[in-house]
Image (cartoon, rainbow, N blue to C red):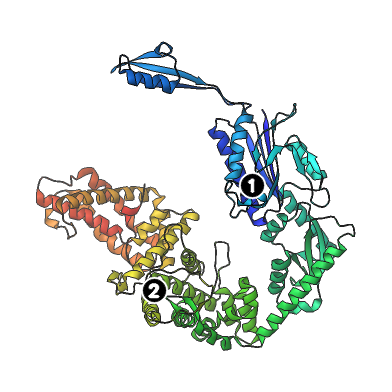
């Protein structure tokens, strides 16, 4: 079957847009083909800095004929209805219609056949529309037609369009259409400098080969492979090692059509700067890779350039030009770094008095003070030295106002560590400057030093409590302050470091501190803001909330709401790890479950128990008891939560169940108290025979009202006994 080749040739497409643009082109064209009844065999899209290309193979040469059956008016119906039917269906007279018998009478039926179009005609209709409506993040108009509302908009000026359709054994047909004065055809162009002449192409294989000869590597994956392989080879030749950077590799592959890898150098004196600063300078300004010594792991004074041309001088001028720029940039970076070292971190703190963290949450100075207080409270819970923790929390954000972080914001925290070490701070205090931001994502490292853990938890909890206090919670997919990430980071800190800590008291105690700052800043003049945690404001509500019981602690309702948010994030994380989210619900439903580590261990034990025959059968029995209770309590508008009357037991099965519950309840509670959740599950299994026998022999809704009530109370005893472990009613089938 025929294949389609489509190329949209333009000025340079930004590297960051290329991958999505290629996928959008493939999706939009193939979706429309399928909608037109043209089912294809395969499709693949490519991008270079100057072209988007799509190949779709195995497309039918034409659409299938479409047969339609349309029901008309009743035989003998109104003349107006019949006339409308004939006009709508294109029939000349009723003689061309068929009559279909129906229980309601005889009706006219029009059978029409619509001939399918040749695929070339369909493509000529859909391709211009797709190009005109292409979803670029940013687009532009150009040329004489730029002021016309009907002119084409594209990411960069579009120069030519290749659109051919045909089979391998024949000359392909051009898909004919015109856009903004550009007619589709078979002509493209090679490399801008090394092979700028026009190229006539026929189909995809021919197109790829001719582009290769014209110094264009079409496939971005192939360009990445060339850059990576050549860079590794250049480094290995000098006994060095490439510092690989996948994100930079993707970007560089989108900047060149014919990658040529070269190595440059810089003054060794610049190696006195932290390696991360050198890397950020070279990466951000020149899109170059840095090089390290495999023996020490430290950077060497070399860098890797990816040129887009085979220079006649072997790249000498290109290397020299990059070396000049990098020398100037590194000189600036060295100046920033050495200037920063002259001022101690604590001497920078007064600047935060004039920097607003959030309009309603006060200044950065107030936020730092809150984090210091909170970190000191958390420190004993994680085994951290309180004084070191307070010092670390005080200095953790000081590097935000340094010259180097101002130039390279991505180095915040890391530079704080370097400056702290340079001024003689304890290693744990210094490490917390970098680590308190972590983890920032599922692949990020989780700090293990106790001081870093305390400060990181304090930072994340203050963020969450603060935005909860001003009612700026995530809604739907919107989370401008990255609160979901903060909660997930706190969860990982707790779980991966096996931290035993109750969150509810911590949250409840921190809300008043935040409320105080909110109240104190409500009438202050807005100051200059610093970008940390995002922006965006909404109405403030600092009115007193009702308190609710949370286990054995009176907790602000906002803390309960925030704990629910933690529970949802925990469920999502456990689900990604293959656990059942309904088991998390079953544990959290018990109330007072704010020790996340114990929640996870209880969930793990519950999951193992439910995989056993005893667990499955007991769950079914408890669910049956809960369902019956729910129905009867709703019907009777009362709860059956009192103790059963032993004198009303009429059957042995009732007595046996009551005895089993009396034995199992205390044993299970004792096991849970010792955090032996597996042992508690084993104890729970003892209920299974008694529960099975009860439902097999006992009629709950007895004719005697007193007996019925007593048996419902016994069912409630089952539910209450198992709640020592989990709320079995929340467990799904």
Please name the residue that numbered disc 1 is placed on.
22
Question: Height in image: 99 above or below 234?
Answer: above
Task: Report crowding for label 2: few under 14, some 14 to 19, many 20 or more residues within 10 A (C-alpha).
Answer: many
Q: For residue 434, what is the image quadrant?
A: bottom right
**C-alpha separation, residue under disc 2 versus residue under disc 1:** 47 Å
Disc marking residue 507 = 2
Question: Height in image: 248 above or below 537?
Answer: above
Pick the front one: 470 or 96: 96
Residue 385 appears in the rendering = no
Q: Where is residue 1 in the image (x, y as percent from the top left)?
A: 66, 27
Residue drawn 62% across the image and 83% down it: 420
**In the rendered view, does 468 fall on the left or right side of 548?**
right
Residue drawn 16% across the image and 56% down it: 638
Dot 2 lies on which element?
helix
Question: Height in image: 95 above or below 426?
Answer: above
Q: Earlier in the sequence, mark 2 or mark 1?
A: 1
Q: Position of residue 143 (x, y in %)?
A: 68, 51
């Amino acid at each position: 079957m025929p294949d389609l080749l489509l190329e949209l040739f333009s000025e340079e497409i930004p590297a960051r847009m290329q991958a999505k643009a290629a996928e959008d082109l493939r999706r939009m064209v193939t979706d429309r083909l399928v909608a037109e009844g043209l089912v294809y065999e395969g499709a693949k899209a490519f991008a270079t800095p100057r072209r988007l290309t799509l190949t779709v193979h195995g497309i039918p040469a034409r659409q299938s004929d479409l047969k339609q059956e349309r029901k008309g008016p009743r035989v003998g119906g109104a003349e107006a209805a019949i006339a409308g039917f004939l006009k709508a269906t294109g029939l000349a007279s009723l003689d061309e219609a068929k009559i279909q018998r129906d229980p309601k009478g005889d009706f006219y039926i029009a059978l029409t056949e619509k001939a399918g179009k040749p695929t070339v005609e369909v493509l000529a209709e859909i391709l211009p529309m797709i190009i005109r409506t292409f979803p670029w993040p940013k687009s532009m108009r150009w040329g004489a037609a730029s002021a016309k509302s009907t002119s084409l908009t594209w990411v960069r000026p579009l120069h030519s369009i290749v659109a051919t359709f045909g089979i391998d054994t024949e000359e392909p047909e051009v898909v004919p259409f015109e856009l903004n004065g550009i007619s589709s055809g078979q002509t493209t162009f090679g490399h801008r400098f090394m092979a700028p002449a026009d190229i006539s192409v026929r189909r995809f294989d021919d197109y790829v080969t001719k582009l290769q000869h014209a110094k264009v590597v079409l496939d971005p994956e192939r360009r990445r492979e060339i850059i990576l392989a050549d860079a590794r080879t250049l480094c290995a030749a000098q006994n060095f090692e490439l510092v690989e950077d996948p994100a930079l590799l993707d970007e560089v592959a989108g900047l060149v059509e014919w990658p040529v890898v070269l190595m440059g150098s810089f003054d060794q004196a610049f190696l006195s700067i932290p390696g991360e600063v050198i890397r950020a300078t070279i990466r951000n300004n020149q899109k170059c890779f840095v090089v390290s010594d495999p023996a020490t792991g430290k950077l060497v004074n070399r860098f890797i350039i990816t040129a887009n041309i085979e220079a006649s001088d072997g790249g000498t001028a290109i290397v020299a030009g990059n070396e000049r720029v990098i020398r100037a940039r590194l000189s600036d970076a060295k100046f920033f770094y050495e200037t920063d070292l002259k001022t101690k971190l604590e001497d920078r703190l007064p600047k935060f008095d004039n920097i607003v963290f959030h309009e309603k949450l006060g200044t950065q100075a107030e936020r730092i003070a809150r984090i210091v207080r909170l970190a000191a409270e958390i420190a004993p819970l994680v085994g951290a030295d309180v004084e070191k923790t307070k010092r670390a929390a005080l200095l953790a954000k000081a590097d935000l106002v340094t010259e180097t972080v101002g130039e390279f914001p991505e180095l915040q925290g890391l530079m704080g560590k370097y400056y702290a070490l340079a001024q003689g701070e304890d290693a744990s205090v210094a490490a917390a400057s970098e680590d308190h931001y972590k983890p920032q994502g599922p692949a990020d490292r989780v700090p293990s030093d106790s001081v870093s853990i305390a400060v990181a938890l304090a930072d994340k909890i203050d963020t969450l409590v603060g935005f909860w206090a001003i009612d700026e919670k995530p809604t739907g997919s919107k989370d401008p302050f990255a609160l979901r990430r903060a909660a997930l980071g706190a969860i990982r800190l707790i779980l991966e470091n096996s931290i035993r800590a109750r969150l509810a008291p911590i949250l409840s105690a921190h809300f008043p501190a935040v409320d105080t700052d909110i109240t104190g800043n409500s009438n202050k003049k807005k100051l200059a803001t610093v970008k940390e945690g995002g922006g965006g404001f909404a109405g403030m509500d600092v009115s007193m909330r009702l308190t609710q019981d949370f286990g054995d602690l009176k907790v602000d309702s906002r803390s309960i709401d925030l704990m629910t948010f933690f529970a949802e994030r925990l469920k999502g994380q456990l689900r990604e790890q293959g656990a059942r989210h309904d088991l998390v619900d079953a544990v959290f439903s018990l109330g007072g479950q704010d020790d996340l580590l114990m929640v996870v261990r209880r969930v793990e034990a519950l999951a193992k128990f439910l995989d056993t025959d005893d667990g499955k059968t007991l769950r079914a029995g408890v669910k049956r008891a809960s369902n019956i209770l729910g129905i009867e309590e709703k019907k009777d508008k009362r709860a059956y939560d009192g103790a059963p009357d032993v004198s009303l037991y009429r059957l042995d099965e009732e007595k046996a169940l009551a005895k089993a519950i009396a034995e199992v309840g205390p044993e299970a509670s004792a096991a849970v108290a010792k955090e032996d959740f597996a042992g508690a599950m084993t104890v729970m299994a003892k209920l299974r025979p008694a529960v099975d026998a009860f439902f097999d022999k006992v009629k709950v809704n007895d004719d005697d009202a007193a007996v019925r009530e007593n048996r419902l109370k016994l069912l409630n005893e089952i539910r209450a006994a198992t709640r020592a472990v989990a709320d079995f009613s929340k467990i799904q089938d």
